[in-house]
Amino acid sequence: MKTSFVSVVALVAGLGAGTARAAEAPIPDAGVTAGPDTTIVVSATRSGDAVPASLLGSSVTVIDNQDLQLRQTRILSDVLRDVPGVAVTRIGAVGDETDVRIRGSESRQVLVFVDGIKADDPNVGYFDFGTTITDEAARVEVLRGQQSSLYGSDAIGGVISVTTLSGRELPGVTLRAEGGSMGTYDGGGRIAGVSGNFDYALSASYYHTDGYAIAPGGSRDMASSNLGTTAKVNWTPAPNFKLTAVARYSLTHADFDGFGLSANPPLVDGTPVNTAIDEPGGFYRNIGWYGLIGAKWDVLNGMMTNSAQITFADTKRKDYDFDAEDYTDHGRRWRGSVNSTIRFGNAHIKHRLTVSVDGERQDFFDTYSGAHRIDALGVVAQYDVTVDDRLAISASGRVDTNSHFANDTTFRVTGSYLFPENTRIHAAYGTGVRNPLISDLYGFSPGSYAPNPNLKSESSKGGEAGVAQTLLDGKVTLDATWFDSRYADFIESFCTTATLNGQTLPASCNIPGSFRQEGVEASATARLADWRIALAYTYLDAPQSFTGLAPDGSFGSQTIQAVHRPKNIASGNVTWAPMRLPFAATVTVRYNGRQNDYAYDAFFDRLAVGLKAYTLVNLNATYDINKHVQIFGRIENLGDIHYQEAFGYQAVGRAGYGGVRVTL
């Protein structure tokens, strides 16, 4: 079925006239809590309600603003390395492409919301974390597993929701400035507060580094600059009515190198292969504009909540060669959502029924393939029931139609039960879809690759089951979860050929058959007196068929662990913050097990190559001079470990930073 944008708007507007509620990521303030030791999650339901994590069947990790501050996180993707099930790959220096995978998914199969706005680049179809620095006051939720029944395409691996805190949640003025290794300087500021029925938060962050040489044996440092600004305003003229407006702007200016055979290329199975090579004059500029306007209102004494919102995302990237524009892509997305939630029941059994509608228009343009458009419509129904705040069951289903692909129907069921001994069992099963990238369908590079407009959507189905134990009145939580996913119609680049302008060129295709990825996630968190501890471990078995050059020079197929997906990943964060001292210190240890990557020979034929495991240690500390002024410092990669996240690209060595924060 094909859907026109006119019909999408008509349906969204029609439903909005009667019932509505914050559809996509949450409009409610993200800092709402139910108690000092209760973790609250908003992204796991389309109702927008803040739900205790103890009532969720799905696995979720929350990184609050205090975690971000204690770990002195400046690059958003770095803190995601501490989440079970997540693998992060930065291909080069800060500002370069950064991929985030959940439970073995591709980065394009992870859906990202920032302040309720679907934030992936509409042109390339995924969110590049290389363009994102951390907001001055924010909260991150990572919801794992197939979530397409709630959010539609892209949510195969999971959903990452980043929410800046409102003026009501964290009022005041904060200024921060720091500097350090590699000519790095960065800073930020935030002013937030409440004035009558209004609360507001205005923030800005800037990060610049002269960088380092990512090319093996190279000398060109990869400099980058990142600017991010956010404005959030809420107007609550009545207890049952609220208007929200969000505006965001991001700017990234970063150098990039070439990729080819160096004068002394490395050998893989005796074959010279390409790496990053110095290429003076290459840089890109990425500009993103984002906006949200939403309203929510309660009726029937809060039994029914309605809302509507419109979001906007506009991203443009330009590549330059010595200030001469070489390539441009531009994507724009308008998204309208309405939602209604009805609550009924009694003190023992509580029911919640939610109906949502999402309409979306995406426009694309790039230098080579021209302009294209996709319209989409999704309808969601979700039912949640809890019994005595111990048993929680949720079921959701969604139907998606759009102007380019066949209809998709997805579902998810979850369950959680808390025993009197504070032992909780939880489980979930669901399906997911991922529509092809616009670059796969229509994008091409003259003489390099051709489009394939006949691609089908990727699909996935999978489940999880786990057990959690809380101790010491909720101050300590242990959790272990097994997960299993099966993927079908996986889209791979350069696996077939197509004819373009008389040339036979490589193109993307859907890989026949399915493959399976399974593993175990384990985590432990503790907040004990002066200590704050977070430990995470992931085991992932992700076999994948690989067709390329064998060590004997033949071209064939073999099965390997999927690239950029280590079998073992672990992290630990331990903070000591004594209440009676103006001092705090955090040690972060991150282990990345051996992983595979692709290497390419002079003809760009693929070879499989293994990258060594590595362990990085970061150390940071703060000291409060008085209640308004704090000084801080950190050392990253304390052991000066030499490693590679991506083959052919050097990672950064030891680096130190220091600065001051002023709070008014």
Image (spheres, rainbow, N blue to C red):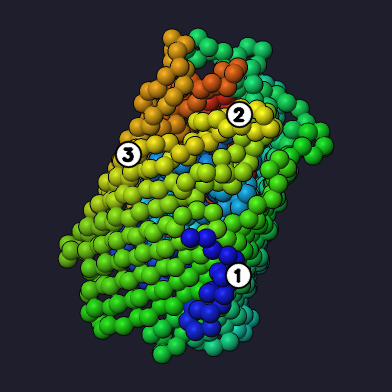
Q: Secondary structure at mark 2?
A: strand
| Numbered badge on residue 233 | none
In space, the residues marked 3 and 1 are separated at their CA atoms by: 40 Å
Q: Earlier in the sequence, mark 2 or mark 3?
A: 2
Q: Residues within 10 Å of mark 3 (few under 14, many from 20)?
A: some
User: Residue 446: horizontal and vertical position, in percent?
Assistant: 69, 32
Q: Nearer the viewer, residue 426 or 574?
A: 426
In the image, what residue occupies the spot 26% across and 67% down?
392
Would you say the residues marked 3 and 1 are in contact, meaning their CB atoms lie under 8 Å apart? Answer: no
Q: Which residue is mark 2?
A: 505
In the image, what residue occupies the spot 63% across and 41% down?
443
User: Residue 66: horizontal and vertical position, in percent?
Assistant: 49, 58
Q: Earlier in the sequence, mark 3 or mark 1?
A: 1
Q: Secondary structure at mark 3?
A: strand
| Numbered badge on residue 6 | 1
User: Residue 140: horizontal and vertical position, in percent?
Assistant: 48, 57
Q: Amino acid at mark 2?
A: Leu
Q: Amino acid at mark 1?
A: Val
How many marks are shown on the rendered structure?
Answer: 3
Q: Amino acid at mark 3?
A: Arg
